[in-house]
Amino acid sequence: MVVVINFGGQYAHLIARRVRELGVKSELVNPDIKIEALKRLNPQALILSGSPYSVYERNSPKVNPEIYDLKIPVLGICYGMHLIAEQLGGRVAGQNSKQFGKVKIKWQKSNLFDGLVGEQTVWFSHGDIIKSSPPGFKSIGKTSTVPIAAFENSNNKIYGIQFHPEVTHTSCGMQILENFLFNIAKCKKDLDLKQIRDSMIKNLKSELISDKVLMAISGGVDSLVAATLLKEAISNKLYCLFIDTGLLRSYDRTDFKKVINKVKFPNVKVVEAGDRFLQILKGVIDPEEKRVKIAKLYFEILKEEAKKIGKVAYLAQGTIYPDRIESAAHTKHADKIKSHHNVTLPHGLKLKIIEPLADLYKDEVRKLGKLLNLPNEFLNRHPFPGPGLAIRILGEVTAERLEIVRQADEIFISELKSSGIYVKVAQSLAALLPVKSVGVMGDARTYSYIISLRSVDTLDFMTADWSKIPTEVLEKVSSRIVNEVRGVNRVVYDITQKPPATIEYE
């Protein structure tokens, strides 16, 4: 078991995810955890996460320095490294030459870097540096501008790294974590997804007993797997609801029907609500206001339907870890990036919330789905956000703009599928930009919208790289969109990584 102390960094949960990926149990705790409570968890190692704070700020989160006396191996990551330095007698300060993004680092010999030679590419995400190491520590890594990019006290098994090994942008990150877990902390692999599945079903049976549960499903992977778990646990006490918000893609209803026929969920109902959602979005341009308004109406409809069913005690959701992280839910000291549909719960909701997948990442959800015998055609669907196309239309959502982005999306996705690319990338989408540009069609001037295409490669959806789609495919997509979608005369391809960008536009 590894305890990850969460100082509010956006990657804190991803650290725990990586530990689990390596086959070791992990648990996130807040920095104010009592030493006795920490001891009861009996961890083999501690990892201190990053944070949006600087250690010298007045209200920056701290951990009880007695953790260093527990004789448990410690790895500090970014802010975690700075905190080790600050609490054990070193010095941390800001610097003018900040390092964010990919950086080359040179190693020195250390058990932490066993098997790594020469320079490696790592991911930096903080503007502070360690000016001097604590007594008993030595530098084991440096960059062109950071002389102490990693340090160690090998006698006490305390290590710190300025960069983030948990993100995919750090090419050697998993090797470093593996070295720490198995070579230094002597952890044992003890995590089994089959056991997690069985435990989830058992716990759901025990928790829900004879209660009715309402579940809104859209055909997406998360809600599908969550609903299947509930079906296994409570059978016909599960009530499934498909709310057509009018913000869906043209093929979502068709795919939903396929899912229902294949999985054979009980008690399924479709609610038509497109006009209601368009009405509340009239004149709204702020992304966060869009999300909140959509979520509020969505839950109002759920409450209406729950009353019709009668005696519904629970509302189930397909919330997964990244949703909670970006919404800063259940996490002290975290910056909120955006509200997620499954997390933005309205005040006064009387239904109890149950989230079977809240501790899992997308790839784990897909693996769990396979263990539940769900077909690959459903599990391999790209993610689609709860607010739907509303957050792929930058600016006001109108019926005209919805139709434009819906047609553009259909063309993009169909071409990716026909070229065999769809199954190789993690998520693809078309977004409508709220500006118009001058073009020419048939010798006539046009002044029309711009469509931005986005496709990313990722395993965990916490970090992502843009997909290297062949230019001939992009050219065909662009040609089809400007020729077939009325109101568009320009198509661009987004080549921004996450971070700094998010995958969705709003």
Image (spheres, rainbow, N blue to C red):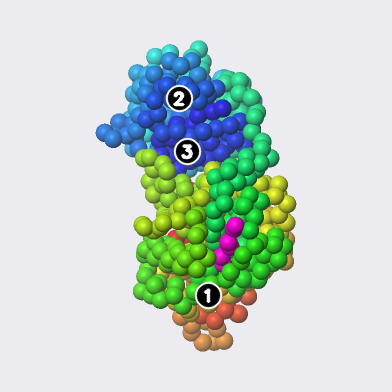
351 w.r.t. 409: above or below = above
Give the residue type at disc 1. Glu
Q: Residue at x 52, y 24 (%)?
A: 43
Q: Residue at x 54, y 45 (%)?
A: 207
N-terminal of the pair, mark 2 or mark 3, is 3
> Horizontal placement of 191 versus 437: left or right?
right
Q: Residues within 10 Å of mark 3 (few under 14, many from 20)?
A: many
* Foreground label between 2 and 3: 2
Give the residue type at disc 2. Leu
Rendered location of residue 7, percent (x, y): 40, 35
Find residue 12 and name its label: 3
Find residue 185 and name its label: none
Part of the protein shown in magenta: 237-242
Q: Nearer the viewer, residue 333 or 96?
A: 333
Marks 2 and 3, how far apart at CA: 18 Å
Quarter of the image that includes the N terminus? top right
Q: Residue at x 62, y 65 (%)?
A: 267
Find residue 272 and name its label: 1
Q: Nearer the viewer, residue 227 or 409?
A: 227
Residue 219 appears in the figure:
yes
**Residue 240 located within the stretch drawn in magenta:** yes
Question: What kind of element bears circle 3?
Answer: helix
Q: Nearer the viewer, residue 336 or 253?
A: 253
Q: Which residue is mark 2?
A: 38
Rendered location of residue 438, percent (x, y): 46, 78
